[in-house]
């Protein structure tokens, strides 16, 4: 059971380039999330998706684009990368089924460390 | 101002010792409060989950407490091990999937 995976694990890019971070989950969870983690800050929500073809903005969506054509994939694209987008990006998934509804547990991927030069 | 604050920012203890990490929050009402452990280079993993009405929850050597009146939570680690070296993140879940993360406490356990 692979769970939730992210690729690449590390990425270095230059200002102005387009970058896509991939997230794949094998649980068929309905919800998927993208967070960024910066020193001194808690994880901050960029975008989330409640189901295929349904996405919504989180706390810090500017400069990012998401899509969700399939339940298992939730790519995050930086259309024109900036230095301020240097961060560690985490994807997460959850499924508010009857069993988990009380706690809505989110399961996190291993993260992608992105450096924008 | 962060809605969830944690202290200390970092902590160094010797193996076998106990320690307590603090979390203060301003968000209210909330559905539940969680503590996550994040190993270096990994994603966060849930340790404990407490609903608004619970005031303590244990998971092995980890014990979390919640005081809803003072809006404080703590995570107590007993008989620390080298593998406890990690960041510990306090999370307040407002409703549904709305998670508010604290900045974390970095714990180092030395032999």
Image (cartoon, coloured by chain):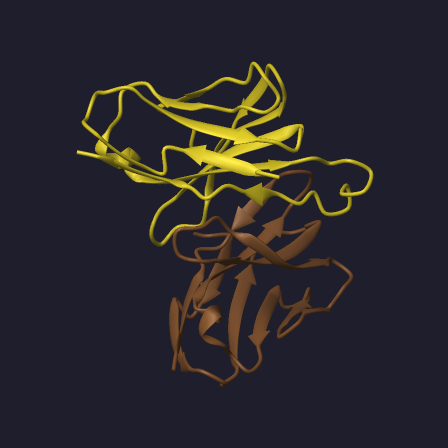
Q: Could you say which quadrant of the image residue B65 lies in?
A: bottom right
Look at the picture and state if B43 lies above or below A27.
below
| Nearer-the-camera pick, B58 or A82 | B58
Q: Which chain shows up in yellow?
A: A
Q: Residue shown at 69%/53% (left/top)?
A: B32
| Nearer-the-camera pick, A117 or A112 | A112
Look at the picture and state if A30 lies above or below B103.
above
Task: Judge left or right: residue B30 versus residue B18.
Answer: right
Residue B27 visible in this rendered orientation of the protein? no
Residue A22 visible in this rendered orientation of the protein? yes
Q: Quick one: quadrant of the C terminus of chain A?
A: top left
| Nearer-the-camera pick, B15 or A100 | B15
Q: Could you say which quadrant of the image residue A9 lies in?
A: top left
Q: Which chain shows up in brown?
A: B
In x, y percent, where is residue B26?
56, 56
Q: Residue shown at 54%/23% (left/top)?
A: A73
Task: Judge left or right: residue B37 versus residue B92.
Answer: left
In x, y percent, where is residue A32?
58, 31
């Amino acid at each position: 059971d692979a769970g939730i995976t992210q690729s690449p694990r590390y990425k270095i890019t230059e200002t102005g380039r387009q970058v896509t971070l991939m997230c794949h989950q094998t649980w068929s969870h309905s919800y998927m999330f993208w967070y960024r983690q910066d020193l001194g800050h808690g994880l901050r929500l960029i975008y989330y998706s409640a189901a295929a073809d349904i996405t919504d903005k989180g706390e810090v969506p500017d400069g990012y684009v998401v899509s969700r054509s399939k339940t298992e994939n939730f790519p995050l694209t930086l259309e024109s990368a900036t230095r301020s987008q240097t961060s560690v990006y985490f994807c997460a998934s959850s499924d508010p089924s009857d069993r988990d509804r009380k706690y809505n547990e989110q399961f996190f991927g291993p993260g992608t460390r992105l450096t924008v030069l | 101002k962060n809605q969830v604050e944690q202290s200390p920012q970092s902590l160094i203890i010797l193996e076998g010792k106990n320690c307590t990490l603090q979390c203060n929050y301003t968000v209210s009402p909330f559905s539940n409060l969680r503590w996550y452990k994040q190993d270096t280079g990994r994603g966060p993993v849930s340790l404990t989950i407490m609903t608004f009405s619970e005031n303590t929850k244990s998971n092995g050597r980890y014990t979390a407490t919640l005081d809803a009146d003072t809006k404080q939570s703590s995570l107590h680690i007993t008989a620390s091990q080298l593998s406890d070296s990690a960041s510990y993140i306090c999370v307040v879940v407002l409703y549904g999937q709305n998670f508010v993360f604290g900045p974390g406490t970095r714990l180092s356990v030395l032999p």
